[in-house]
Image (spheres, coloured by chain):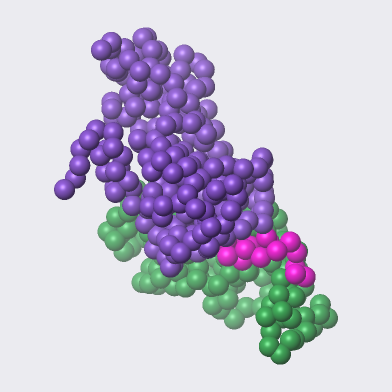
């Protein structure tokens, strides 16, 4: 079997979901046997490649760069997993939506609360232009699976990946997924260590 | 006392006349999800999560009295679909950010979402601008998290007898209020008993100073108070 082409993408999030990805600990070694990480903030690749089998997308769509990225990710990926609460609901990244647009938020941050008062970065600067509303990933592109949690737990991510590897449908609700929580599934401390014997932790 | 015999999910059960479907089902060990309901308070049927199919009709089980030969279904696909929709709509109606909420991990809306298999929201969040009232010296009110279950209104009226809380406004402007829309801290009828905070299912009412996940709604104390009042059973 060809190695799975795996990617992880970091949009508007705190990277906590990626830290949780690393929480899979020794399973990462098993995963490396069966999957090749072709794009990720954890590896040194600049351009999102074509022909990705599975992508975990962390974070909400907050600026024009994210918008462009998520469209490219969707076009080049077979299975897109919305990875963590920011990607699934907008979460903390979307709190600014209540302010009613990007400008009031930028004014609050760079002018009103800045001492001395600064200037708002212009679109011609390095920072990408903010969208007026922060959007969850599924508001922009089709999402195949949702993995809520802030962040989803390492065992939960592992379960999702294992289901993908075996071509099984991913219904993770039985594993006590929850918005806001670490989402550790009940009994996950007894998860088997090897991916080959990992289908029985419901 | 008259006894009614009815069928719930194909199981024949006996119930006392005057009992609601919800009470009878729970006594028979059949679980029906609820949100606005709280044992000891008058039922209002506000949230519609406890809908059941009784003789083919959709009825709120918290308000429907048992009847002889009633055929009740509590777990049909249609009911599950509606319940899931209700929870998604509640999440979309205000600003529920579980990860930074004082009630994270102790929230009935969050638990219901888990139980009903809500893994994302199919509805666009409304993102209304909601106030946070920190004028009370002991408690806080965050309208972002309120689901308008009116438990606070009922517990204050029916158990404490103060009737500090009420509901004002319509539609998206609907809010729980204290004393004719005064800041909570200025509400002269409030006895600071904290029963509203104990009754709240989400992070809308909280103890000031609580941080993320720290606000635990002390439901046991509340139930002990209700029991003491209704059945004259005083815990020593």
- Residue A36 lies, with reference to residue B229, above or below; the image says below
Mark yes or no: residue A80 visible.
Answer: no
Q: Colour of chain B?
A: purple
Residue at x 48%, y 26% (from the top left corner): B60
Q: Is residue B202 magenta?
A: no
Q: Colour of chain A?
A: green
**Residue A12 lies in what quarter of the image?**
bottom right
Given the current orientation, which residue lies at the most extreme bottom position? Answer: A116
Where are the magenta residues, as a range? A83-104
Given the current orientation, which residue lies at the most extreme right position? Answer: A124
Tally the marks. 0
Specify whether A125 is left or right of A174: right
Q: Is residue A88 magenta?
A: yes
Question: How far across and down, in percent of the image, does residue B166 sit?
Answer: 54, 42
Specify whether B33 is left or right of A71: left
Residue at x 57%, y 60% (from the top left corner): B132
Residue at x 40%, y 68% (from the top left corner): A24
């Amino acid at each position: 079997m060809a190695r799975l082409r795996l990617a992880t993408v970091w949009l508007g999030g705190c990277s906590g979901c990626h830290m949780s990805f690393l929480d899979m600990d020794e399973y990462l070694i098993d995963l490396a046997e069966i999957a090749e990480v072709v794009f990720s903030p954890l590896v040194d690749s600049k351009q999102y490649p074509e022909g990705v089998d599975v992508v975990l997308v962390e974070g909400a769509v907050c600026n024009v760069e994210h918008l462009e990225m998520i469209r490219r990710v969707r076009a080049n990926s077979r299975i897109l997993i919305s990875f963590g609460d920011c990607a699934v609901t907008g979460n903390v990244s979307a709190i600014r939506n209540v302010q009613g647009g990007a400008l009031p938020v930028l004014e609050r941050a760079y002018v009103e609360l800045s001492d001395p008062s600064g200037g708002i970065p212009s679109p011609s600067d390095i920072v990408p232009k903010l969208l007026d509303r922060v959007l969850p990933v599924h508001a922009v592109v089709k999402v195949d699976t949702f993995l809520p949690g802030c962040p989803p737990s390492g065992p939960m991510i592992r379960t999702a990946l294992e289901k993908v590897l075996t071509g099984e449908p991913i219904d993770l609700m039985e594993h006590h997924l929850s918005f806001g929580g670490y989402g550790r599934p009940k009994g996950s401390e007894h998860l088997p260590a090897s991916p080959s014997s990992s289908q029985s932790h419901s | 006392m008259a006894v009614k015999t009815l069928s719930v999910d194909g199981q024949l059960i006996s119930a006392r006349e005057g009992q609601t479907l919800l009470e009878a089902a729970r006594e028979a060990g059949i679980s029906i999800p609820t949100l606005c309901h709280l044992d000891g308070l008058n039922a209002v049927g506000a949230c519609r999560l406890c809908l059941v199919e009784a003789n083919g009709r959709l009825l709120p089980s918290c308000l429907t009295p048992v009847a002889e030969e009633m055929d009740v279904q509590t777990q049909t696909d249609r009911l599950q679909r509606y319940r899931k929709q209700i929870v998604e709509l509640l999440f979309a109606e205000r600003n529920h950010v579980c990860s930074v909420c004082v009630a994270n991990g102790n929230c009935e809306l969050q638990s219901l979402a888990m139980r009903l298999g809500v893994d994302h929201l199919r509805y666009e969040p409304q993102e209304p601008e909601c106030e946070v009232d920190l004028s009370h010296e002991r408690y806080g009110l965050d309208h972002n998290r309120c689901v308008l279950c009116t438990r606070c209104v009922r517990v204050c009226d029916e158990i404490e007898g103060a009737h500090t809380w009420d509901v004002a406004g319509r539609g998206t402007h609907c809010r729980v209020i204290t004393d004719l829309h005064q800041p909570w801290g200025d509400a002269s009828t409030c006895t600071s008993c904290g029963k509203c905070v104990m009754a709240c299912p989400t992070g809308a009412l909280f103890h000031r100073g609580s941080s993320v996940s720290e606000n635990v709604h002390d439901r046991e104390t509340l139930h002990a108070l209700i029991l003491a009042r209704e059945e004259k059973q005083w815990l020593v």
